[in-house]
């Protein structure tokens, strides 16, 4: 054959390959491709490639790549052989140049492969020799295949989104920048994969990859990405309220290799979405309102009230969060019986250990809906989050002893308005019916009975650290399914606000009491107002009303509950979390067993941030973006910070705005230079000592 054949150059044809593999947005020098799909490589030799020349493209993954272990793929275009499902062929061979096509197996381990080319005994190592291989939702043979282009655009390629927070009946979107294509984010994900010590064979499987990532996004067992903190004190870190996206968090983690402080559920979910989309697993953020944290797996959460109707914090180990955010990931479940493919819940917020580690999922939504809570992973936990019942207890002093009186059972208030961002638009999509059958339907009853057969039933007695001196008259064994309290008089309660809830204004609340039975009834009403964090933790008692009302026949009356501003404004300034207004009402009809309790949570309303910029701009041409905020409240906002970020436009920036007096307008500007085409979003957030929840976003289209 004459002289030795040597390689003088390897062109990974990055721009063409990345466009075809939907990876052109990654801010990285290396080639990024998806598994099970062909990509091309151009080789240049010292002479023309002949039929008897020895040539092998070698892709190795892990510490010591070996052919026997399947971690070294040595691909020879001259030999027809199936190497772990990888294929190679010569597309064009002319002169000293040879164009090859390589297709990895749709089951190949995901990660960072090192490429070299062997000719005879010579080995050529190209510059940027690392090739990143990702999951492929576009490939029918990949188990993350998603057969809908609009959904792939949203759940894999969209790098911005909305996370729904607030409370069940005042839901609002919090903009979040996922930023899966930003610099170092893919490298951070690869570092996490290595750190997970997941066997290479398990890196093929999105079930294991999503499970370990749910563990690694929290710092609890493994020095993972984020340290959770719900204490209200964030002095030696960043308050969970101050993040507007995952990019800063993952970049910082990759740089320091230490947990970033601090996260709460939407931050964990935002970062896990970034990691999943970055690796190519379709993912969405899911917000569950009135989310039960049922520590005993008995599908029941106890709420304890004092005689004023104020919720007590310390009585119970289980709790109801106003909202909790986790993730759904899309995949086939080849490890389960048929019928459980599709969306699976995973959760990175450290709540409960699963197999000794703070991790949760993947759990098929269908298993939750049908009550198949024996299926892996963690389906009992997820089932309880969306299906537990709430039992209200009032603690009364009787002859100097505490007596627990059950005053109501609510079977439909938990797991409501389960929300995610809609595909292709900035709207809320309600996905409750993917998690549960309609409340009260026959299917729901059957699913509940099936689930109860796998969960520990328990006597209906209050649990908790202080409930040892138990009153015997309330000891009931748990019926299979708890029922709502039935009323003789048709007693109903409604809680509302009669004025907008602006910080600095009095809170004008009202409790409406209704009766539908004929006759004259005396009703003892207690109503209280508290401030609480989103996890249901009470931070302040603000006031209460206690009244006896007489209602005749079918009638109603409205009792006002007014909280002056100076009663709560100090608390707002002291707490570092965004707090919600929690109102509880208890009504008891004299001479009957009719007792009813109702509670609701509302959020404060805030003046808006206005973002001013052109509707379109051109690639690499500067434009100005302005952020304007007018303090329409009648209180001064102290120590204000404005945080802004625009992926593909400018890096995250913070402006210190100082104190903003009532009526004052602030305006901050940033010069943007677009580096990527298409629709781009700018996100802004304003925090002050008194308020945490103001955010805004605006879209701009970047053209050539």
Image (tube, grey):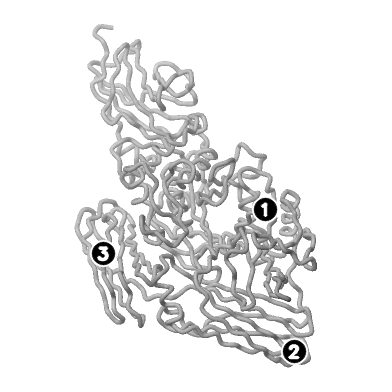
Disc 1 and disc 2: Cα gap in Å? 40 Å
To which quarter of the image does residue 607 belong? Answer: bottom left
Q: Secondary structure at mark 2?
A: strand
Q: Residues within 10 Å of mark 1 (few under 14, many from 20)?
A: many
To which quarter of the image does residue 237 belong? Answer: bottom left
To which quarter of the image does residue 356 belong? Answer: top right
Percent of width and height locating residue 552? 73, 93
Percent of width and height locating residue 512? 62, 84
Residue at the left extreme of this rendering: 622
Q: Is residue 430 left or right of residue 680?
A: right
Asked if the residue at tag 2 contacts the one at tag 1, i.e. Cβ–Cβ closer than 8 Å, the answer is no
Disc 3 and disc 2: Cα gap in Å? 59 Å
Q: Residue 36, can we see it? A: no
The residue positioned 30% from the left and 69% from the top of the image is 639
State the residue position of label 3. Answer: 655
Percent of width and height locating residue 169? 55, 71
User: Residue 114, relative to residue 245: is it above or below?
Assistant: above
Mark 3 / mark 1, whichever is N-terminal: 1
Mark 3 / mark 2, whichever is N-terminal: 2
State the residue position of label 1. Answer: 297
Q: Secondary structure at mark 3?
A: strand
Percent of width and height locating residue 659? 28, 73
Quadrant where the N terminus sits is top left
State the residue position of label 2. Answer: 521
């Amino acid at each position: 054959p004459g002289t030795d054949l040597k390689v003088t150059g390897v062109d990974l044809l990055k721009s063409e390959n990345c466009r075809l593999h939907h990876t052109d947005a990654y801010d990285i020098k290396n080639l990024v491709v998806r598994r099970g799909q062909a990509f091309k490589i151009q080789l240049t030799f010292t002479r023309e490639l002949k039929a008897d020349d020895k040539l092998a493209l070698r892709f190795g993954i892990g510490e010591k790549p070996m052919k026997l272990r399947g971690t070294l793929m040595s691909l020879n275009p001259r030999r027809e052989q199936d190497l772990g499902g990888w294929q190679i062929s010569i597309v064009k061979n002319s002169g000293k140049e040879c164009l090859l096509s390589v297709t990895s197996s749709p089951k190949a381990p995901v990660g960072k492969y090192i490429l070299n080319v062997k000719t005879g005994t010579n080995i050529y190592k190209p510059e940027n020799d690392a090739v990143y291989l990702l999951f492929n939702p576009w490939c029918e043979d990949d188990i993350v295949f998603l057969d809908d282009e609009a959904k792939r655009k949203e759940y894999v390629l969209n790098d911005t989104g909305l996370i729904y927070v607030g409370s069940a009946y005042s839901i609002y979107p919090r903009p979040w920048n996922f930023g899966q294509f930003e610099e170092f984010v893919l490298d951070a994900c690869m570092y996490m994969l290595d750190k997970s010590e997941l066997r290479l064979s398990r890196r093929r499987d999105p079930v294991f990859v999503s499970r370990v990532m749910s563990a690694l996004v929290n710092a609890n067992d493994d020095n993972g990405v984020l340290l959770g903190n719900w204490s209200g004190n964030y002095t030696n870190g960043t308050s969970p309220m101050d993040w507007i996206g995952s990019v800063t968090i993952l970049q910082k983690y990759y740089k320091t290799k230490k947990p970033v402080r601090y996260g709460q559920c939407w931050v964990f979910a935002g970062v896990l979405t970034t990691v999943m989309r970055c690796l190519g697993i379709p993912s969405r953020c899911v917000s569950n309102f009135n989310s039960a944290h049922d520590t005993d797996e008995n599908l029941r959460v106890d709420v304890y009230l004092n005689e004023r109707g104020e919720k007590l914090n310390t009585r119970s180990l289980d709790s109801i969060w106003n909202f909790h955010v986790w993730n759904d990931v899309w995949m086939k479940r080849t490890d389960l019986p048929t019928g459980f493919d599709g969306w699976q819940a995973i959760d990175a917020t450290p709540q409960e250990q699963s197999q000794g580690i703070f991790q949760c999922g993947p759990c098929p939504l269908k298993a939750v809906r049908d009550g198949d809570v024996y299926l892996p992973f963690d389906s009992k936990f997820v089932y309880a989050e969306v299906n537990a019942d709430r039992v209200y207890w009032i603690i009364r002093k009787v002859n100097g002893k505490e007596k627990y009186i059950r005053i109501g059972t609510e079977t439909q208030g938990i797991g409501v308005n389960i929300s995610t961002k809609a595909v292709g638009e900035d709207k809320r999509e309600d996905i409750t019916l993917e998690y549960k059958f309609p409340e009260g339907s026959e299917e729901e009853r059957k699913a509940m009975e099936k689930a109860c057969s796998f969960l520990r039933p328990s006597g209906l007695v209050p649990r908790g650290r202080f409930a040892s001196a138990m009153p015997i008259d309330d000891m009931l064994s748990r019926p299979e399914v708890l029922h709502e309290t039935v009323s003789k008089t048709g007693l109903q309660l409604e809680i509302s606000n009669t004025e907008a809830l602006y910080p600095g204004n009095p809170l004008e609340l009202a409790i409406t009491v209704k009766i539908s039975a004929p006759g004259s009834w005396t009703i003892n009403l207690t109503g209280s107002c508290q401030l609480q964090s989103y996890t249901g933790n009470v931070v302040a008692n603000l006031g209460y009303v206690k009244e006896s009302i007489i209602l005749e026949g079918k009638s109603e009356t409205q009792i006002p509950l007014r909280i002056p501003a100076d009663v709560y404004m100090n608390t707002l300034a002291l707490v570092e979390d965004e707090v919600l207004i929690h109102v509880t009402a208890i009504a008891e009809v004299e001479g009957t067993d009719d007792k009813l309790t109702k509670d609701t949570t509302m959020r404060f309303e805030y003046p808006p941030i206005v973002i001013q910029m052109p509707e379109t701009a051109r690639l690499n041409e500067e434009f100005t973006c302005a952020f304007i905020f007018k303090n329409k409240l009648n209180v001064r906002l102290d120590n204000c910070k404005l945080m802004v970020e625009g992926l593909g436009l400018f890096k995250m920036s913070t402006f210190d705005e100082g104190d903003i007096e009532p009526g004052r307008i602030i305006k901050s500007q940033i010069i943007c230079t677009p580096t990527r085409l298409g629709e781009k979003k700018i996100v802004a957030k304003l925090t002050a000592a008194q308020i945490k929840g103001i955010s805004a976003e605006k879209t701009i289209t970047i053209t050539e």
